[in-house]
Image (tube, rainbow, N blue to C red):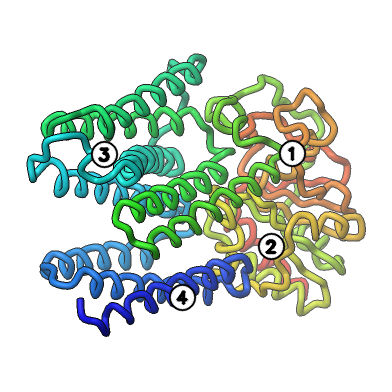
Amino acid sequence: MTDVLQQIVPLLYLTSAVLFILGLKGLTKVRSARRGNAIASLAMLIAVVATLLDLGLVDYRWILAGLVVGGAIGGVAALRVEMTAMPEMVALFNGSGGGASALVALAILWLEVIEPGHSGTAASALGGSNALTAFLSILIGSVTLSGSIVAFLKLSGRLRGRPGFLSARNVINSGTTLVALGIGFYMTFGAADPAAVATWAVALTAVGLLLGILLVWPIGGADMPVVISLLNSLSGVAAAATGFVLDNNVLIISGALVGASGLILTQIMCKAMNRTLGHVLFADFGDDDTDTGDNEYTNVRSFSAEEAAMMLEDASSVVVVPGYGLAVAQAQHVVREMADILTAQGAKVSYGIHPVAGRMPGHMNVLLAEADVPYEQLLEMDRINPDFKTTDVVLVVGANDVVNPAAESQPSSPIYGMPILKVGESRSVIVIKRSLSPGYAGIKNGLFEHDNAMMIFGDAKQVLQDLVKELKELA
């Protein structure tokens, strides 16, 4: 590398690192999220260019092939993905990051230890710290890859139910983790010839993939926002570990940023559910087959779209509480149309956003942003809860556990202590739901029997279209 490039590459890396930080900061607000994503994308482009300059003479044919194929897959996926499938796509992207880190670490072992026929341990060939981080990159990347695939399968409905060994899963997972660590340390510091290093590297990858499956498979859909955040963090940690192996500062920085931000987001998600990360990983809440057996309702009132429209027409303040049912029905554009009609009639319309509504962090924000809902109308749980007491009508669309008063009133409930949107404090509540089936917590929702609550059964999009039609006729 020439003297000029030796001076330019560090500056490009520094620029990339700063842009990554600015992009991440932009992603913390709905209003600036698109700009933050664009900045982070620019940072990645600069990092890739700087890395290619740093490498010097390389075979660009493979690199260009990777750019074309990967770019095409990513572009098509991003353009064609439905909002309901966004959590699944995020899960796959997390897994891709982890898998890429594991493959890079395996490639380093191949190029530096196995192919040259190095006589000695991986630690002696790469250095103790680099060999150790290569082992961690393989393990964490493999766990992230398989765990993300399982999360994708569960989110897409292709994998349901609990494995038969669920009751012993903590023992099994602990044993598998110890085996993975033992294999990794022996591969790094014990195996003394290339063939042994290769064998143990394959074994480490296989056990890491198995561990990812064992960790995520028993976790139910209610905890998927936490799982996706954690997998995102792990993909960053794997990338940072790979950065140490490659001695690439920008990869270390960006990986550390993703790892730290993902861990912080995981903690925020756990706090929103009043649960610990350990409880999410090792307890049974949110299992797909959960059923308390006490889901009978005796005092539910069913109303028509016409009656609901008359109530909305007379309201001066309306809060919409979106849930996964809104995403499934692809009803975000219709709810925006309804809100515009109510606003034109003089009503104040806002949206109450629970942190874990949907199947990934920020799912409802992304969904409503697609319908160009004004950012200032999106209010987080802590901001909107005090307003419910003075709200005329709350319209709950496809949400269940996040509005269940059992979280505050029933100590025996599995969701007791979880912060909820206190919609029951409003003057009237309209709940749009296909049926009285329980949410992912598998429990009855006492809100449906409140005197101020009314149910409209049906597909969220169709019901909202009926409401829009009735509101237009009443205007």
Where is residue 374? Give x, y as percent.
Answer: 67, 74
Q: Which mark is residue 418?
A: 1
Q: Is label 1 or label 3 in front? A: 3
Left or right, 421 with respect to 425, comes to left
Are the two marked residues, 2 and 4, in contact with CB atoms closer than 8 angstroms?
no
Inter-mark Cα distance, 1 to 2: 32 Å
The one of 294 and 79 positioned closer to us in this rendering: 79
Which amino acid type is shown beneath numbered disc 1? Met
Circle 4 packing at 10 Å, graded few (<14), some (14-19), many (20+), is some
Q: Which mark is residue 467?
A: 2
The one of 85 and 304 positioned closer to us in this rendering: 85
Q: Which residue is the site of mark 4? A: 38
The one of 120 and 428 positioned closer to us in this rendering: 120
Dot 2 or dot 3, earlier in sequence: 3
Q: Residue at x 66, y 21 (%)?
A: 292
Left or right, 123 with respect to 215, comes to left
Q: Which residue is the site of mark 3? A: 123
